[in-house]
Image: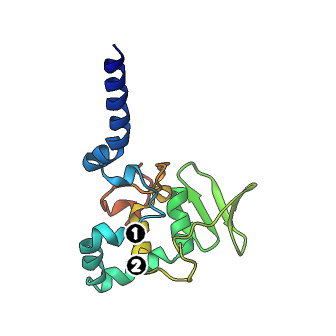
């Protein structure tokens, strides 16, 4: 009887040890590791290379990722924007105070500049499309797997 219990416990411990690796094999590491601590280029260098070599497209996406007003607009689910006002999908009005966007007592200013060097470089550009907070998701890793649907970034969120 004791051998069965020990064997059962050994199998349980082994299962707990290999479970994250096994699951990430099928669902991707994005569900286990924070995207803020993982270098996107490590696994997706081919994708980054395509973006960097696209010239015009890369420069436009880099500029968008570095535009704090635009990333804040995306994170709020903006449907209308002017230089001093964002309307979100709930109809809330966010006003520019000169340093942050404010709605009542709530303030926000979303930046993708993780390294604090006042510019978008390397994997930071990946966060323009894959940062969970910009797309209304609360994934614990901060990264979502999604593809470009054009409407979300190039249009607006009126049809969501």
Circle on res. 7: none
For the residue pair 83 and 10, the one nearer the viewer reads as 10
Residue 56 vertical placement versus 155 (above, below): below
Query: Which image quarter: residue 68?
Result: bottom right
Q: How far apart are marks 1 and 2 (CA)?
A: 9 Å
For the residue pair 2 and 153, the one nearer the viewer reads as 2
Residue 67 lies, in percent from the top left, at: 52, 76
Q: Badge 1: how crowded within 10 Å, few (<14), some, or many (20+)?
A: some
Question: Do callouts 1 and 2 mark residues in contact (Cβ within 8 Å)?
Answer: yes
Residue at 62%, 53% (x, y): give it. 92
Residue 91 lies, in percent from the top left, at: 59, 51
| The N terminus - image quarter | top left
Residue at 37%, 84% (x, y): give it. 59
For the residue pair 96 and 25, the one nearer the viewer reads as 25
Mark found first going from the N terminus, 1 or 2: 1
Q: Badge 2: how crowded within 10 Å, few (<14), some, or many (20+)?
A: few
Query: Which image quarter: residue 72?
Result: bottom right
Q: From this viewpoint, which residue is outermost toward the right?
A: 105
Residue at 26%, 84% (x, y): give it. 53
**Which residue position is annotated with label 2?**
122
* Mark whose residue sits in front, 1 or 2: 1
Q: From this viewpoint, which residue is outermost toward the bottom?
A: 55
**Which residue position is annotated with label 1?**
39
- Which SS class for mark 1? loop
Residue 87 lies, in percent from the top left, at: 58, 59
Residue 15 lies, in percent from the top left, at: 33, 35
Residue 146 vertical placement versus 113 (above, below): above
- Which SS class for mark 2? helix
- Color encoding of the figure: rainbow
For the residue pair 51 and 156, the one nearer the viewer reads as 51
Q: From this viewpoint, which residue is outermost toward the front?
A: 2
């Amino acid at each position: 009887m004791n051998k069965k219990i020990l064997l059962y416990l050994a199998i349980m411990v082994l299962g707990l040890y290999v479970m994250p690796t096994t699951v990430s094999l099928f669902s991707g590491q994005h569900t286990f590791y924070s995207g803020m601590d993982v270098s996107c280029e490590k696994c997706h260098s081919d994708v980054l290379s395509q973006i960097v070599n696209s010239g015009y497209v890369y420069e436009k996406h880099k500029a968008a990722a570095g535009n704090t007003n635009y990333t804040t607009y995306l994170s709020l689910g903006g449907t209308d924007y002017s230089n001093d006002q964002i309307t979100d999908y709930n109809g809330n009005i966010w006003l520019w105070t000169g340093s942050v966007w404010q709605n009542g007592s709530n303030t926000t200013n979303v930046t993708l500049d993780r390294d604090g060097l006042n510019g978008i470089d390397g994997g930071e550009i990946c966060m323009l499309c894959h940062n969970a907070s910009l797309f209304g998701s609360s994934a614990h890793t901060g990264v979502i797997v999604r593809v470009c649907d054009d409407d979300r970034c190039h249009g607006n969120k009126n049809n969501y």
